[in-house]
Amino acid sequence: MRHNIIIFFLIAALTTSWSCKQFLDLPAKNQRTVTTVDDVKTLLASYLRGVAELRVKPLYGNVMCLAPASGTLMFEAYSDNIDFELAVPQTYLKPNNNHLKVEQGYADLLLWNDFNTPGLIWNQHYSIVGFLNSLIDQMEEIEATPQQQDQLLGEMYVHRAYYLFKLLEYFAPYNKGELGIPVYLHTGEGVLGIEMPRRTQAEVYKIILDDLKMAETMIKRTAPVAGFSVFYNNRYIHHLMAQVYWFKAESPAKETSDYEQVKTHAAIAAENTEAFIPTTVTGMINAYGAKDPNYPALCQENNLQGAFGVIYGSNFQYLLPGTYGPENIPLSAEFAALFKPGDVRIGAIFNADPARAGGKVGTAGKTLNWGWPSDGTATGSLKRGNACFFKPEEAFLMLAEAQFRLNSTGEAITTLNKFKAFRNAGTADGLAGDALLQEIIDERRKEFFGDNDKRWLDLKRFGKKTITRKLFFLNKSYEFTVAPNDYRYALPIPLTEVQENKDLIPNEGWIAIEY
């Protein structure tokens, strides 16, 4: 099915079912009514409001369009920080589960059988790319000052780069350079019905980085617009460039200069942020729960209370223990063992109240704190789903790894120690080689627990961990082994997309489990 979209001033027809081909199915330019720079600003602002404000649906995409809550749940389910072999019988499948009462729902999540969430991400991200394409094309035909061109195009280039990067991270097998993603950057009569094969990963990285480099050039000469610009932000641009080069640097598309680029851009992204990085449990709850206006990151929040409850525990646990589940989520022993005594994150991630969870506290108790991942409350009474983007903490860890990869061990230790000081997590003094790299990986794992896609992407990128899982669902036992470079690290492309686009090679291995 095809859906033609005509962009009107203040109005956009939005469909719920899209394919990446369909973002090209826009009418010729002379049929659009976007004719002035104010038209573009109004449409773009309607999208940006949903990016910059909590619990707001943008013009295109869903609430939390940068990281849908269902995606965070899926990525956690596909990772290794929660002890799912304990969680399933202990709490997920208990009668008091207040969030997901259908056993197959957990089976799909924990057996790598979720086909709906990848489809949601694919369709939403490509629809937003198409929206941005149409406005970028239209900017060629309207009168705007050079400053307006920079401010509007710069904003759109960074957003387009972000969504294409996420599509590449999620749907491209990390070790197969020929299998990138489909990309087309224009709209209009001349491209209707075009078939789009997957570009190589190198080609896609070039497109992403070209967009970011253009935005970087623009922001050097033209300042952002206060109250309007969101991604058109010097620190955010450099942070995203560091992320792109960092992920590219271990892929088949890697180039010798990648880690130098990571070092340059991560250093800029981390600059002058130390004073704003939270160093207490309360500070972390407020910063990552979008309650600290000085925290230098972009935060989003879902509009559905309890959206994270399915995996991370009910938002009603605090009312009457034993009544509302899931509750007291067990964390893996391997994960708990990473933390040194005194680490600030212990009080945030692990239960600290002896009156809860049968007295299981701290890393020895291996039980998730009701209030984590942070929703801005101490008891997790909201659990709407929160995510922060362009965290300075990530910039420090990317910088440390880049320095390590460039054989600057001393610099890497200095940067890593600066980060560890934020968390009272000891030092990396005396480490070198694989031990130092593993320390960086472990810090990422501790720091980004419950943080959208980060642990899953680390498992994909570093390729150092095999996940094994034995579970019992619907009267049947299941045993899985997910090794590095397993096909499950490239999400399934929606079947409707493959059927519509004969030139699109699907990701192999994905066969739905029939229960």
Image (cartoon, helix red, strand yellow):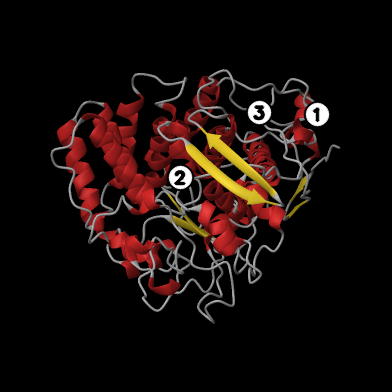
- In the picture as drawn, the residue positioned furthest to the bottom comes out as 320
Q: Residues within 10 Å of mark 3 (few under 14, many from 20)?
A: few
Q: Is residue 395 left or right of residue 476?
A: left
The percent position of residue 169, horizontal first and vertical second, equals 53, 34
Closest to the observer, 45 or 417: 417
Q: In the figure, residue 226 lies in which quadrant? A: bottom left
Q: Earlier in the sequence, mark 2 or mark 3?
A: 2
Q: Is residue 286 left or right of residue 116?
A: left
Name above or below for residue 162 compared with residue 83: above
Name above or below for residue 504 compared with residue 385: above
Q: CA distance from mark 1 to mark 3?
A: 17 Å
Q: How many marks?
A: 3
Q: Residues within 10 Å of mark 2 (few under 14, many from 20)?
A: some
Name the element at disc 3: loop
Name the element at disc 1: helix
The percent position of residue 360, horizontal first and vertical second, equals 38, 69
Q: Disc 2 vs disc 1: Cβ atoms closer than 8 Å?
A: no
Q: Which residue is mark 1?
A: 499
Q: Residue at x 58, y 70 (%)?
A: 325
Q: CA distance from mark 2 to mark 3?
A: 23 Å
**Which quarter of the image is occupied by the C terminus?**
top right
Closest to the observer, 34 or 296: 296
Q: Residue at x 19, y 29 (%)?
A: 408
Q: In the figure, residue 21 lies in which quadrant? A: top right
Q: Is residue 401 left or right of residue 105?
A: left
Q: Which residue is mark 3?
A: 509
Closest to the observer, 8 or 378: 378
